[in-house]
């Protein structure tokens, strides 16, 4: 494809800027959905959502063009070919359910994380099926995922939010991403990958938002029954998650969403359109012989059992987001995947007073053990121990050396732990 991505998007922006002003995102969405003839195979609404967003928010095209320019510089640099450190992305799963079947168990959510980790590390067992012609192009992306262990306020978490909802079926209009519309609000989208697991209607399996979109709607949505072991066969091995997270990490459909289109990746062959089902190798289109389409790529529309690789070019494109100046660089330093040093669940039986205090803090435990026998430590909200605090040994603690702010007091006697927060004035 001759047209560059940049000119394509600037063109789109100028056209849409003229027409889009008053139309809401959702009316744009339904219009786009009606107008677009969906290719056969995996029903993914990511490009529909992108078109609607670009129409409603022309500035987004400029932001995406900037990301594309940074990606191009990264991919062209030697850094892209260097073995990068593994980046582990904290994930929060928002499970929205109207029926008990939609309230998928923890084990299935962990299984989805496991599928993501295997697919992104090329440790998926079906990687053995990659045709020899493409084996050299198959990538370990060095991107991994973990259910969040620390929420945005620093508290311990399972990384799974469950919410009963009156909504029976959702569409690709982002309603599931806000509690105002009976959905679940995202956690800080610069620090967490938010995945909404819900009952998508209209036959949709999932959709994602590309880097450069609004922070308030950033993340991935998947049909609850597409999780590993779900009922959405042949899309029930968790590859909807892999495909959509690929979009979230800036990957295009491998056919470039056009006839013999451009997916902005150099090592994926140009192909006519989406593939579906489970094609036989080789499938030659767009003069891409002898190897033909890379239909076993996660960014095609084939069955879950028939997609099993990302390419090196796709991997470089995703990793560009985490490089200096990359659109998702803040995720690389997020502490959402590591447990806080102390659980901040308040224990009612432990009291500290006066609270707030300027100097001395007196401690009364709920157990019949004098505070004097407990080891006493104070942590700030980030979990760092405040070494300047001196327990006096008589049930009081001198906190006068602490800067003003909120802290956690933790008492341990070797078996039990009690904690309480207090404010230093
Ligand atoms: Zn897609």
Image: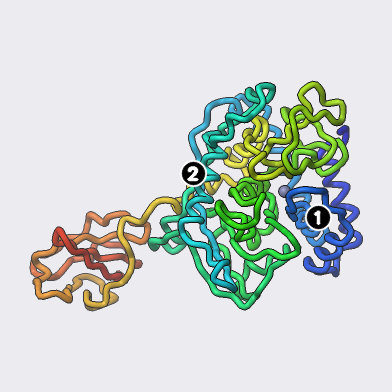
Label 2 packing within 10 angstroms: few (<14), some (14-19), many (20+)? some
Placement of 197 over or under 12, stated as above or below: below
Q: Is residue 406 left or right of residue 129?
A: left
The picture quadrant where one finds residue 370 is bottom left
Labelled disc at residue 88: 2
Q: CA distance from mark 2 to mark 1?
A: 30 Å
Give x and y (percent) for residue 325: 61, 41
The picture quadrant where one finds residue 202 is bottom right
Q: Residue at x 83, y 60 (%)?
A: 33
Label 1 packing within 10 angstroms: few (<14), some (14-19), many (20+)? some
Labelled disc at residue 51: 1
Do labels 2 and 1 touch, CB within 8 Å?
A: no
Quarter the N terminus occupies:
top right
The picture quadrant where one finds residue 67 is top right
Placement of 87 over or under 148, stated as above or below: above
Placement of 239 over or under 375, stated as above or below: above
Q: Is residue 252 visible?
A: no
Q: Secondary structure at mark 1?
A: helix
Placement of 152 over or under 288, stated as above or below: below
Q: Is residue 39 left or right of residue 214?
A: right
For the residue pair 123 and 374, the one nearer the viewer reads as 123
Q: Secondary structure at mark 2?
A: strand
For the residue pair 142 and 222, the one nearer the viewer reads as 222
Q: Is residue 330 left or right of residue 286?
A: left
């Amino acid at each position: 494809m001759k047209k560059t991505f940049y000119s394509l998007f600037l063109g789109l922006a100028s056209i849409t800027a003229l027409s889009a002003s008053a139309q809401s995102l959702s009316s744009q969405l339904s219009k786009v959905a009606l107008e677009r003839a969906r290719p056969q195979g995996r029903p993914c609404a990511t490009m529909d959502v992108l078109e609607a967003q670009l129409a409603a928010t022309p500035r987004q095209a400029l932001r995406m063009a900037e990301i594309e320019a940074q990606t191009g510089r990264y991919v062209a640099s030697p850094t892209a070919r260097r073995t990068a450190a593994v980046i582990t992305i904290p994930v929060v799963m928002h499970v929205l359910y109207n029926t008990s079947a939609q309230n998928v168990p923890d084990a299935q959510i962990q299984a989805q994380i496991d599928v993501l980790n295997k697919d992104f590390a090329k440790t998926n067992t079906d990687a053995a099926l990659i045709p020899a012609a493409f084996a050299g192009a198959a990538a370990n992306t060095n991107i991994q995922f973990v259910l969040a262990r620390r929420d945005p306020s620093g508290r311990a978490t399972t990384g799974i939010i469950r919410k009963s909802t009156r909504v029976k079926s959702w569409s690709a209009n982002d309603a599931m991403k806000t509690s105002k519309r009976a959905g679940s609000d995202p956690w800080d989208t610069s620090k967490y990958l938010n995945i909404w697991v819900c009952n998508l209607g209209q036959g949709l399996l999932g959709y994602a938002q590309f880097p450069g979109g609004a922070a308030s709607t950033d993340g991935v949505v998947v049909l609850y029954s597409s999780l590993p072991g779900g009922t959405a066969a042949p899309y029930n091995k968790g590859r909807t998650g892999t495909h959509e997270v690929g979009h979230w990490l800036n990957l295009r459909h491998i056919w470039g969403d056009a006839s013999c289109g451009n997916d902005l990746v150099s090592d994926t062959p140009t192909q006519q359109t989406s593939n579906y089902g489970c094609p036989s190798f080789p499938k030659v289109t767009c003069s891409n012989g002898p190897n033909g389409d890379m239909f076993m790529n996660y960014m095609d529309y084939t069955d879950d059992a028939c997609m099993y690789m990302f390419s090196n070019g796709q991997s470089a494109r995703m990793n560009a987001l985490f490089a200096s100046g990359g659109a998702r660089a803040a995720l690389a330093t997020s502490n959402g995947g590591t447990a806080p040093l102390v659980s901040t669940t308040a224990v009612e039986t432990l009291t500290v007073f006066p609270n707030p205090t300027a100097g001395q803090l007196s401690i009364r435990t709920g157990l019949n053990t004098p505070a004097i026998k407990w080891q006493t430590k104070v942590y700030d909200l980030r979990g760092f121990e405040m070494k300047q605090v001196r327990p006096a040994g008589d049930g009081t603690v001198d906190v006068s050396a602490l800067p003003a702010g909120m802290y956690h007091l933790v008492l341990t006697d070797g078996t039990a732990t009690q904690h309480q927060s207090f404010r230093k004035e």
